[in-house]
Image (cartoon, helix red, strand yellow):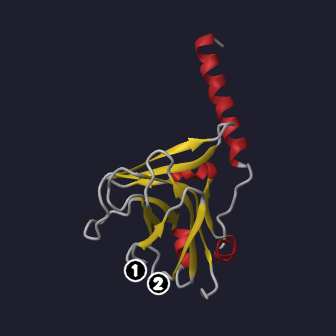
Amino acid sequence: MRDRFFYPLALMVIAGLIGAALSFGERVPAPSPAEIRQAGFTLAGEDLSLLTASPGTEYQLTRNTVGEIDHAVLTAHIPADPDISSIGVFATLIADYEAAFAGQLLEVTLTARQNVDRPSPEFLVGYFTDGAGNSGWKSFILTPDFTDHQFYYTPQAQSETTGRDFIGIWPDTDGESRAVDIKRVRVQLAEAPE
């Protein structure tokens, strides 16, 4: 067989063998609603790169001495306005979490502090859904040290899953480009607050 036919054919056979082998690899099943309710939702470390910034806000990732993501620095360049349908910088909870958390009392916790260079005095956090109600913005005063800030919310159950819920964060209520450092976003089932 000539080289011009042999090498392309050999590459196709090798690619096919690799593809077949990978198709039989271990598949990780989606977590069940019970597993989600037990483990909750956490965004920290490398997962902070999954945050999304709405127009007027932004975030940057800060790494530690070994190159791992330590926290995210969130900034708002426009003031928070309830008439604007922006939820700031947000974490997305996919459909599996939306379905598992619907109708459940949730404890939403953000581990946050004032940014050293451009400290924001306070920030807003909210739980938002696609058509099943929102918590509204909750205001928290920031300190120089990482502190847990919590609120409770029960998202309504929906007749059908719309696909996602969101934890929105507005870093600077006045929109003066001040910043908040976020180390962790956590959502878990909660007992009624005392």
Q: Is the residue 111 above or below the residue 62 in the image?
A: below
Q: Are marks 2 and 1 in contact (CB under 8 Å)?
A: yes
Where's residue 17, x and y in %?
70, 36
From the viewer's perspective, is residue 26 above or below residue 87? Answer: above
- Residue drawn at the location 62% of the way across and 29% of the way down: 12
Q: Classify 99 as above or below 20.
A: below
- The type of residue carrying mark 2 is Gln
Checking the image for residue 156, the label placed there is 2
Where residue 168 sits: x, y (%)?
Answer: 44, 64
Q: Quadrant of residue 123?
A: bottom left
Q: Would you say 25 lies left or right of 159 here? A: right
Residue occupying the far left of the picture: 83
Which quadrant is the N terminus positioned in?
A: top right
Q: Rate crowding at label 1 as few (under 14), some (14 to 19) or many (20 or more) other CA atoms within 10 Å.
A: some
Asked if residue 143 lies left or right of residue 172, the reply is right
Give the SS element for disc 2.
Answer: loop
For marks 2 and 1 on the same chain, the one whose residue lies earlier in the sequence: 1
Numbered tag placed on residue 35 in the rendering: none
> 149 or 106, which is in the foreground?
149
Residue at the image position 47 percent from the left and 44 percent from the top: 117
Between 35 and 116, the one nearer to me in the picture? 116
**Residue 171 coordinates in the image, percent (x, y):** 42, 58
Q: Which residue was labeled with disc 1?
A: 133
- Count of numbered tags: 2
Q: The C terminus appears in which quarter of the rendering? A: bottom right
Decide: few, some or many residues near mark 2? Use Cα within 10 Å; few <14, some 14-19, many ≥20.
some
Residue 169 horizontal/vertical position (percent): 44, 62
Residue type at the position of mark 1: Gly
Front position in the image: 12 or 43:
43
